[in-house]
Amino acid sequence: MKKVEKRYWAADDCPITAAIDVMGGKWKPIIIWALINGNRRFGELHKLIPGAAVKVLSRQLKELEMDGIITRTAYPEVPPRVEYDLTDKGKSLTEIMQSLSLWSQANVLERI
Amino acid sequence: MKKVEKRYWAADDCPITAAIDVMGGKWKPIIIWALINGNRRFGELHKLIPGAAVKVLSRQLKELEMDGIITRTAYPEVPPRVEYDLTDKGKSLTEIMQSLSLWSQANVLERI
DNA sequence: CAGCATCCGAACCGATACTG
DNA sequence: CAGTATCGGTTCGGATGCTG
């Protein structure tokens, strides 16, 4: 029986690529990291990540929500209040991110 | 003593983002994966990943080489032969990729 | 065989201004 | 306060053709 190796016609066939698509947006790791210790309001996140434009931050949050990584809770108040929090799926991601962070500090940032 | 949280003005300040920059190119996880069982010639990689245009594959390989993930060995023959192989740093990445793959199959691809 | 050069189109990021 | 709308600029991927 001849073994035929899998051929990749589309990058999404790779599970690793699929995972990176979920957590690999420009500011997404930072957002997830910021939510580890509990929920945050939009304004708080914006203060923590001033480098991200409001529109960009907003869209990354929406994508994370659609991928089931975070929840968005809007309180019908004036002025409005919106809180973001990690889901269980999001929390499970943080363990892998911890590994990535350690690897990065040992293998990428060590050149500094 | 008041605790001030780190503010992110640039995404690259995040070690996780830095790691994803290294391994997060569109075809890079597949390339790294293909090299786990030993070196490969350019043409072999191209056959395994027909979805990637030659130019794109070539550049991703060059970036991986510059980041110290793979080595490139050119043999002065006619016709030319070039072999790519994982470095130790690259091999250390595969363990994390294994975790990512498992997480992905459990949390992303499970919707299929 | 293993690429590089060129050109094109899509996707994404970002600053500014406006809204409920 | 928490966004959305609009417009630009940049980066990236992809198809094609050429080279040592």
Image: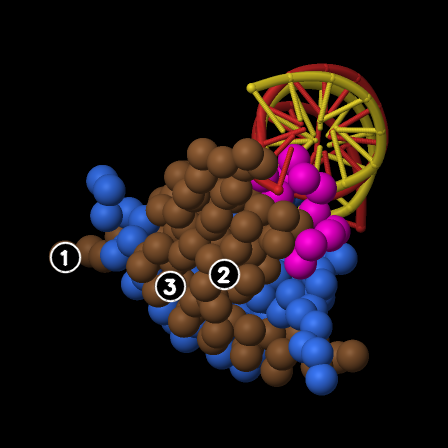
Chain colours: A brown, B blue, C yellow, D red
Sequence-wise first label, 1 or 2 = 1
Say if mark 3 contacts mark 1, CB within 8 Å. no
Q: Nearer the viewer, mark 2 or mark 3?
A: 2
Q: State whether residue B16 appears in this view.
A: yes
Name the amino acid, label 1: Met
Q: Residue at x 41, y 56 (%)?
A: A86
Q: Which residues are magenta?
A: A47-59
Which disc, if any, is residue A1?
A: 1
Q: Nearer the viewer, mark 3 or mark 1?
A: 3
Quick check: A33 above or below A12? Answer: below
Say if mark 2 contacts mark 3, CB within 8 Å. no
Task: Tell me the chain of label 3.
Answer: A
Q: Which residue is mark 2?
A: A35
Q: Could you confirm whether marks 3 and 1 are on the same chain?
A: yes
Q: Could you confirm whether marks 1 and 2 are on the same chain?
A: yes
Quick check: B32 above or below D11? Answer: below
Sequence-wise first label, 3 or 1 = 1
Q: Secondary structure at mark 3?
A: helix
Task: Choose between A41 and C2: the one closer to the eye.
Answer: A41
Q: Position of residue D19 (x, y in %)?
A: 80, 41
Q: Position of residue B107 (x, y in %)?
A: 29, 53
Q: Could you confirm whether marks 2 and 3 are on the same chain?
A: yes
Name the amino acid, label 3: Lys
Q: State whether residue B84 appears in this view.
A: no
Task: Tell me the chain of label 2.
Answer: A
Q: Secondary structure at mark 2?
A: loop
Q: Which residue is mark 3?
A: A91
Is residue A1 part of the magenta span, yes or no? no
Distance (Cα) linking label 1 and label 2 = 50 Å
